[in-house]
């Protein structure tokens, strides 16, 4: 019995010594084409943002996709970007959709947002609308910078979101927004949407 | 509800109408509907019998659980789904039902 116990302990000790080597698994590898673009659900293609950006969820029923990047120098120190097939709101007109959207955007965060700044843009050769807004959480001393691109797929409005969370006294890092812009620029619809084919 | 509002023009295309049903009182629903700018009716059913008929009333719980029901012109239930509405599924069902009606 003692010998068995000893053996078990040795195994445990050896197990503790063998630190797992860090493995970098690309969850999108199977979907990546030779030119580096990822084709998601045969619906759209894009260049995923470079590491340390990481895929947030990979649900096959989900027609949206999101990436997050975290750092540990201070809290909060996080950026997120996402594509949403069904952004909040319902109007097809961008100018009407923006206020509908911001009524619910990050509603659970208790952040108080300023007035969004709207700027006409283009996406995939069609008119789009960029909205920028900053929110502050005074109690926790946190802030968030958000950028939303309202674009069109068929007649419906789709959205790209970007947020960067920082403590109130820390400046935002423009690199993350550049990664978001590159993601949006690379994004292409591979086929007509469900709604266009209905 | 926002998703239904987004799809109203498609429901029109398939000759369908949407109504929401809740156990909340009329004033609460009116405020909520105004806040979301919904243009379709939301029915107040405080006693909960509609939810009981459709199996959306969990025992001992004062609210309906989410359920989508499609009823055809003859009053026959043609589709039921618990939880978050699957709009692709709903629209495909409505398209099929509309095609059946047009044919008959």
Image (spheres, rainbow, N blue to C red):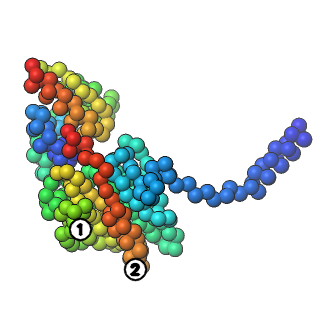
Q: Residues within 10 Å of mark 2 (few under 14, many from 20)?
A: few
State which mark lies toward you, 2 or 1: 1
The quarter of the displayed image where residue A66 is located: bottom left
In front here: A42 or B57?
A: A42
Identity of the residue drawn at 28% across and 47% down: A191
Residue for badge 1? A131
The quarter of the displayed image where residue A158 is located: bottom left
Can see residue A165? no
Determine whether the residue tagged by mark 2 lies in a helix, strand or loop.
Answer: loop
Name above or below for residue B14 compared with residue A69.
above
As measured in the structure, the alpha-carbon distance from the residue carrying label 2 to the one carrying label 1 is: 20 Å
Q: Position of residue A64 (x, y in %)?
A: 34, 51
Q: Of callouts 2 and 1, which one flags the residue occurring earlier in the amino acid sequence?
A: 1
Identity of the residue drawn at 37% across and 72% down: A178
The quarter of the displayed image where residue A168 is located: bottom left
Q: Chain of mark 1?
A: A
Identity of the residue drawn at 13% across and 28% down: B98
Residue A171: mark in rendering: 2
Q: Position of residue A40 (x, y in %)?
A: 38, 49
Q: Residues within 10 Å of mark 1 (few under 14, many from 20)?
A: many
Q: Position of residue A12 (x, y in %)?
A: 78, 49
Q: Is residue A26 left or right of residue B64?
A: right
Q: Position of residue B22 (x, y in %)?
A: 20, 37
Q: Quadrant of the image for the N terminus of chain B?
A: top left
In front here: B85 or A25?
A: A25
Q: Quadrant of the image for the C terminus of chain B?
A: top left
Identity of the residue drawn at 25% across and 61% down: A124
Can see residue B98? yes
Determine whether the residue tagged by mark 1 lies in a helix, strand or loop.
Answer: strand
Q: Is residue A94 left or right of residue B66?
A: left
């Amino acid at each position: 019995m003692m010998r068995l116990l000893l053996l078990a302990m040795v195994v445990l000790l050896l197990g503790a010594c063998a630190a797992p080597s860090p493995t970098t698994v690309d969850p999108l590898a199977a979907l990546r084409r030779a030119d580096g673009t990822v084709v998601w659900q045969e619906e759209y293609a894009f260049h995923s943002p470079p590491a340390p950006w990481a895929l947030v969820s990979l649900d096959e029923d989900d027609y949206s996709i999101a990436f997050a990047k975290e750092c540990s120098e201070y809290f909060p120190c996080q950026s997120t970007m996402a594509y949403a097939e069904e952004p909040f709101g319902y109007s097809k007109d961008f100018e009407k959709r923006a206020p509908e959207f911001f009524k619910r955007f990050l509603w659970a965060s208790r952040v108080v947002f300023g007035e969004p700044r709207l700027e006409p843009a283009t996406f995939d050769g069609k008119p789009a609308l960029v909205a920028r807004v900053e929110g502050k959480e005074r109690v926790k001393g946190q802030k968030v910078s958000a950028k939303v691109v309202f674009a069109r797929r068929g007649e419906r409005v789709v959205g790209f979101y970007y947020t960067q969370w920082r403590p109130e006294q820390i400046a935002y890092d423009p690199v993350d927004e550049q990664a978001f812009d590159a993601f949006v620029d690379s994004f292409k619809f591979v086929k007509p949407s469900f709604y266009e084919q209905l | 509800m926002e998703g239904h509002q987004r799809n109203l023009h498609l429901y029109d295309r398939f000759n369908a109408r949407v109504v929401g049903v809740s156990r909340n009182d009329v004033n609460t629903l009116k405020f909520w509907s105004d806040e979301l700018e919904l243009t379709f009716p939301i029915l107040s059913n405080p006693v909960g019998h509609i939810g009981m008929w459709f199996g959306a009333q969990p025992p001992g719980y004062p609210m309906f659980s989410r359920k989508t029901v499609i009823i055809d012109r003859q009053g026959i239930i043609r589709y039921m789904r618990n939880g978050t509405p699957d709009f692709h599924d709903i629209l495909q069902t409505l398209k099929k039902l509309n095609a059946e009606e047009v044919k008959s």
